[in-house]
Image (cartoon, grey):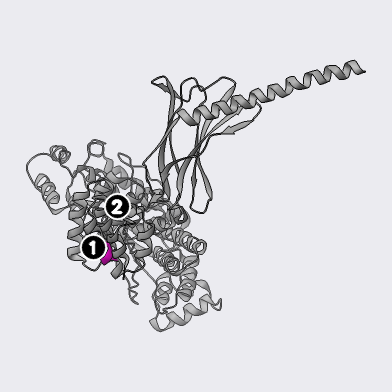
Amino acid sequence: MPLAFSRTFSFFPFFLALLFLTGCTLSRMAKKAEKGQTITAQPEVLMVRGNQVPVEVQAQLPKNLLRDDYRYGIRVFYKAEKGVEDHVGSLGFDFGNYNFVDGKPTMGSSFSFPYAPSKIRGQLMAQGVVSDAKGRKKFTKAKVLAQGIITTPQLIQTMHAPAYVEEDFKNEAKGPLRFPIYFDQGLATLRQGYGTNLQMLDDFIRSNQKTSKIEILATHSPDQTETTTRNLAARRAVAVERFIKQKIETEVYNNTVSSIDFNIETLQKNWGAFLGRVQNSALPEEQIQQILAIVNGPGSFSEKEEKLQTLPSYDYLEMYVYPVLRYAQVTIDYQPNLRRDYEIYLMAKRIVENRANADALTAEEMQYAATLTPLLAEKKRIYESAVETYMSWQALNNLGMVFFEQAQKELRPKVKQTLLASAILNLRYAAHRQPQAQQFYNLAVAHHQHGDALEALQSYDYAIRQGGSLPILQQVFSDKAALELSVGQYDDAVRSLAYAGKGYAAQFNLALLYFLKENYEGAAELGEKLLAEYPQDANAHYLMAVIAARSQKEDAMAQHLKQAIKIKPTLAGKAIDDLEFRKYHKSAAFAGALKP
């Protein structure tokens, strides 16, 4: 027994020595890394993009630091002013993850983390971690990589002016209905999809309105794929005609195919619709004249299209004009049932209160009734009833607008997001049933405010492709550019701003774009032009102060900052936290600019 005890006791010092050696190795590696490693971040002062803060981190370790039986990594985190840490990412120096530069292990990676106002004054930090196979760890001292977050991109200005459908209700028969049915390039196949209008045509046919005549006019876009596809326009017209007749024969009781006069027409290699779209686009007048000169000049149809390809506006034509020329337009003459005006409002209230049948009023009458009250809550109930019964695009659009208006007045973020989500749902259905620039713009703005960048950009593009009045298209391009700026797509924003007109938001964002691309001289020039037109705009003065700070023009910085705060006193607090002015925080000029 004493012998057994002696063997156990003799092993214990060996075990302690092993632990000691392991701990020493971890400590030595940590100290060696801490002394010899180089960790950098770009940019040195972080800048917000959208709701994220992007950063690139690169690390280089001392030679001969890494060992097979130990792992070395670097954790990157952001420490806010109040000590709250956010994990940003990590660099793991595992075999195959790094390269050797000058004989030293080197690797880098791009990260991003969510932005919040509380993080403006924080620090991006990195800390090395040595670990062994059993999970024991040793940390190096944390190193500061970058100080704070610049929020200048959030100065972006938007127009965000979605609109109700105006209710021009009259107790008389309206003109014929028109449904443009859109096709994919080179195809004559009908498809149910976003913006094709086929569902809208289907809904009308099944509504059993007494119909006397249906006209179908089919055409194609000028590009080679469309013009060389045999009988493309005629096949599109036939596809739509078959669809309508099949629906009438199987799903309608108030009409028959034999009782309706069908008239089919096609346009092959015709420039009429193209010129109409071009003249109703956001292209500059000079580019429109270049297009007209080619189309109205000498040459065959294909030769003229080839000449169009050489123009600077051809990208615009391919993206926004050609797709909406691949259609078959259906024109329907029908006779609606009319109702006397004085019954409409009271009947609408009875329907909402479940004291009358939901179909006691037509869709147009229900929508008109909603305009007779200023209360959003009452408008909402009437439009909801109209949508539930008829699902008309007008009611869907206006119900979406009611939710949007309510969201603008809501102070609670979660409730606001819920209201915007409801707005998006209804505005999406409205745009699907009536694909016009205004409807897709309404949807895009709701997505934009809800934080759905990709969906918003898609809807802005759909709005442009529909064509429309120049003021609406400039509005679309202006807000599209604002979103592209906010997500860091600067080159796309340049293209959008070229068609955004000379409105306040477009001019402001162009100056900001120059600034973000570090063209401070150009940004200052554009800012002066903006102030010449809007001399009392606080945001423009603040942007000019930021531009002057980056350009190291202290007097100009102080002058514009003082004017901005005079117009909008709340900007004083923003300036104090704004790292754009960090070099001037202790200067007399900056202190003087903050004084009322």
Q: Residue 58 location, x and y as percent?
A: 42, 33
Q: Nearer the viewer, residue 102 or 301?
A: 102
Dominant SS type (magenta)? helix
Amino acid type, label 1? Gln
In the orientation shown, which residue stands out farthest toward the right?
Answer: 1
Q: Residue 47 location, x and y as percent?
A: 37, 48
Is residue 414 in view from this perspective? Answer: yes
- Magenta region, residue range: 560-564
Q: Residue 341 location, x and y as percent?
A: 38, 81
To which residue does mark 2 refer?
Answer: 481
Asked which quadrant contains residue 220, the reply is top left
Mark 1 or mark 2: whose residue is earlier in sequence: 2
To which residue does mark 1 refer?
Answer: 559
In the orientation shown, which residue stands out farthest toward the left?
Answer: 298
Amino acid type, label 2? Ala
Residue ID at (17%, 54%): 525
Give yes or no for residue 290 being in the magenta stretch. Answer: no
